Image: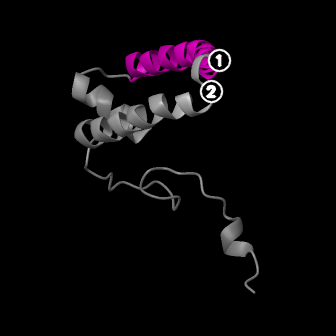
Amino acid sequence: MVLIRSESVRTGTDSPAGVLAALSAANQTVAVIGPTVGGLLIGLGGWRTIFTVNVPLALACLVLGSLRLPREEQLHRDDDTGAHGGSTSPAWRSSPRP
């Protein structure tokens, strides 16, 4: 959510609705096209063909993420779940130690 808020601030919109809409459309597109392309790749070249597509794509995502994602960390914490608002279970606090 921090990344979505920072993107809405960067683009000058008050609400992250546009950013959420773009993410939703991308997720739905990938959910429809992904299995079809994966099946096509496996049918044409076997299961190893998937890696010839996914490994370079993953590397490109890592490079673009390191260039485009904000490096600042949010200092405001509303609770003790972490700087990025992760939902850690409080069970780790109450579980007995060996």
User: Where is residue 94 shown, x and y percent of the image?
Assistant: 72, 74
Residue 69 appears in view: no
Q: Residues in magenta?
A: 16-43
User: Residue 76 in magenta?
Assistant: no
As drawn, 65 above or below 21 = below
User: Where is residue 41 shown, x and y percent of the image?
Assistant: 57, 19
> What numbered label is drawn on residue 43?
1
* Residue type (three-letter) at the residue carrying disc 1: Gly
As drawn, 54 above or below 45 = below
Q: Nearer the viewer, residue 29 or 77?
A: 29
Q: Nearer the viewer, residue 68 or 59?
A: 59
Quarter of the figure with the N terminus: top left
Quarter of the figure with the C terminus: bottom right
Residue farthest to the front? Answer: 45
> What numbered label is drawn on residue 11?
none
Q: Residue at x 76, y 81 (%)?
A: 96
Judged from the image, the secondary structure of the residue bearing numbered disc 1 is: helix
Q: Residue at x 40, y 31 (%)?
A: 57
Tag 1–tag 2 contact (CB < 8 Å):
no
The residue labelled by disc 2 is 46
User: Residue 33 in magenta?
Assistant: yes
Q: Residue at x 31, y 30 (%)?
A: 7
